[in-house]
Amino acid sequence: MVDIIGFASGVLTIYAFLEGLFPGQPDGPSATVRVAVGLSGSEGPDGGPDGPLTSPEGSFKSIRIYNNNGEFLSASPDNVGVDDGSYSDVTLAQQNTQQAPYVQIRVGDGEIVCLAYVSVTFSDGQKRAWDGTWAQPLGLDWYYSGILVSENDQNTGECIWMDEFVGTIFIYMPAFTGAGEDPNPDISAYTGERGFRAYTFNDAVGEIALPTGQRKKRAVKQADTRLVITDRPDHSAVRLCESSNSRGPSLVSLAEGMFCNMATRELLPLCVGDLTEDCFDVSTGNSGQRVASASAKETGFSSVIDWTSNAKF
């Protein structure tokens, strides 16, 4: 079991990272890196996929690893493909058995990827991990990933959007592994050379200073017309709408009884009982079916992604 430092429900914490999210032991002098992207949801009414979170799947241009001195060890082949809600394992051969605590991830040209987590198994069997919950506190665009990452099933994690704006991330993996003590409350302790760095565009020109509260917000070319419906307590519609750097589909939180319209950042309670005005109706209005099982034409959304406990992933 490996404990990592993350932001479960927006609070800095240490939690047990699922053992199954690590890649297997590599053969010989090498390291194996796993990259996972956000989950799209269950099958739609026509049997096809509901659609990804504004294209979270895609390819990574390259994955590179470095030793503790920042010296290059190995690189992946170009274009590592990952399906939405899934992962890819890449074994990087080394000339020696040095550990690879530095991992660099570059997104493919023209791709939009919501990166959920990165995990690595060294040649000596040691394991390290980092997850996308670091996007929100560092001022980078994020959304709920829908992927379970913790042992106690309380945290499905979040993902960080990588595209032409945040094209490269550089992670010092040990900085995000729990050491049996409370995490440092100073967020800046996890940025910089011995932490997390993000760069704009794929050639890593123009480093994004972290934290990035002063940076100019990117222009989103097209609003997401999908809807996520979820019953998980850690998928808060209020937090999603109130975050200045969240990005993705609108969301119904059955646990909160709230709806977040991501196009307008408007929060509405769900229509229940006598509450029939100034609320969001989770039914179609005609048949009384849940939005998650209604057609796109009936709901007004291009598709509905079902993240409830009854969904088929």
Image (cartoon, helix red, strand yellow):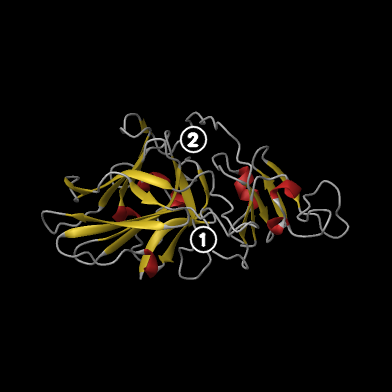
Q: Nearer the viewer, residue 167 or 54?
A: 54
Category of crowding for the residue at label 1, using alpha-carbon neighbours closer than 10 angstroms: few (below 14), some (14–19), many (at least 20):
many
What residue sits right under mark 2 in the picture? 213
Q: Nearer the viewer, residue 185 or 99?
A: 99
Quarter of the image that includes the C terminus: bottom right
The answer to whether the residue labelled 1 contacts the one labelled 2, judged by CB atoms less than 8 Å apart, is no
**Could you tell whether 188 is left or right of 63 in the image?**
right
305 to 209, vertically: above or below = below
Mark 2 residue element:
loop
Quarter of the image that includes the N terminus: bottom left
Determine the residue located farthest toward the front in the rendered image.
46
**Could you tell whether 203 is left or right of 307 in the image?**
left
205 to 28, vertically: above or below = above
Residue pictured at 42% horizontal, 39% vertical: 111
What residue sits right under mark 1 in the picture? 156
Residue 181 visible to the viewer: no
Which mark sits nearer the N-terminus, 1 or 2?
1
Category of crowding for the residue at label 2, using alpha-carbon neighbours closer than 10 angstroms: few (below 14), some (14–19), many (at least 20):
some
Mark 1 residue element:
loop
Q: Nearer the viewer, residue 46 or 43?
A: 46
* Residue 182 x/y as whole percent: 41, 61
Q: Amino acid at mark 1?
A: Thr
Q: CA distance from mark 1 to mark 2?
A: 25 Å
Q: Amino acid at mark 2?
A: Gly
Q: Which mark is residue 287?
A: none
Residue pictured at 37% horizontal, 36% vertical: 109
Residue pictured at 55% horizontal, 43% vertical: 246
